[in-house]
Amino acid sequence: MTTYTINGQRIYVREDGTRRAQVALHIHGWSSSWFALSPVISYVSRRYRCLAVDLPGYGNSPRLPHPTTIYDYTDLLAALIQHVSGGPVVLVGHSMGGMISITLALRYPELVERMVLLCPTISGRLSTYIDLVISPITRLERFSLGSKISNMLESQVINVTDRIMRPALFAERSGISESDYMRIRADARRPGQGRVRAECYRAMQQSDLRGKLGQIEAPTLVIWGAEDNTVPLRDAGVITDEWPSADLRILSKASHWPQFETPEQTQRYIASFLGLPLSSMQLDQTIGTNVANVSDIAQFLCSSDIGNTMNLTQRTRLAAQFNIRMYSPHQEIVHADDIGNHLFVIKEGCVDVLVPVTPESSNTEIHHVATLLPGQVAGELALLDSGQRSATLRAGARGRHTPITPSRTPACTG
């Protein structure tokens, strides 16, 4: 792990991905560590530079020298972003990390490009189960003697503790592996973090975000487990009422840890939202790890025939499926009778559409029927079934010609 010292505070960070790529900052939740977002890091790091922090007082990071607040974490992470990134970043936050992410987007909007939130704490009120069963232990941990008593009792009755906690954390049909479950529980039982757990529990209650969500400008994906018994779905209702631009997804067979419980579905939503290829987690050779290409294409699609009615999130999803191809003047792009399933959107220059004069005509007996300009689409219904093309596409006479083509047909036909 990498260590950063920000404003005198040491922060341990797990780093993955290419250093020149855009930063995606992963922020874990209450009583946890960077590992909480490890399933997400495994695929987001293929296009982003992922920094997964151990918040002060958790994991390997020493606690703050004063009682912890959500604002303390927010200001510290804002300084970290300014230290490691020359531009806005993507925030990925789980639970309390979601509350921190939202607060950061409100206080420092210039630092946040977009957010992915997993079961975020919104109101600061946790479930009745947590309040009745876990809260008394947490309040006891505010005091050094109480923390020692709690740790001693937990070491004696660890199986009972796990049976108490599991219904609050995971769905009845959860798909989490036993090894991941044990690692999550080990982070929660880490010695010496009882006081910061208690401080954060109180900090969440004092950081109610209701009434503020409508101020957020960054595009945001919110994923929630339908059986969440830690941060209840009533907070999702707040998002629906106050934050209609957020893309809210509710997952069945998931509770408070959808990234572990329903990993494939969670991955699919996040990959779509962040502009990762949908049908494969392998990067396209033409795009590589350059997120700027996806952003550039998404911006272009805004004025194209195919994307002019889409919002930014939808255009970004579509943009990730495109390859950029360059053609010289008069260069043939595709030929009539070719079999294929790609359509083209003209980005720069123009493209001539040519058809045979008769079905039996030679290659030289063709008729010019149209010239496609930037933003227009070249495609045929037959391509949906990998049928033959009825027309030849040829780059225009002057300048540079740049059509972009989807790397996968389903992105354009779904």
Image: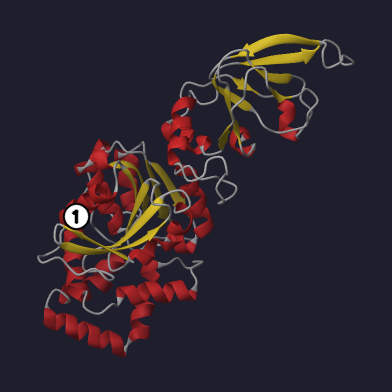
Label 1 is placed on what type of residue?
Leu
Residue under numbered circle 1 = 76
Q: Quadrant of the C terminus?
A: top right
Quarter residue 370 falls in: top right
| Image point (61%, 38%), residue name | 407
- The N terminus, quarter of image: bottom left
Q: Nearer the viewer, residue 56 or 366?
A: 366
Residue 269 image position (x, y, % from top left): 48, 48
Check the image and report above or below for 308 versus 276.
above
Q: Residue extending furthest left? A: 66
Question: Which residue corresponds to the image point at 14% horizontal and 73% vertical from the top-left?
Answer: 142
Q: Is residue 349 left or right of residue 144?
A: right
Residue 95 image position (x, y, % from top left): 32, 58
Alpha-carbon neighbours of circle 1 within 10 Å: few (<14), some, or many (≥20)?
A: some
Decide which of 333, 211 is in the foreground and name it. Answer: 333
Q: Is residue 212 visible?
A: no
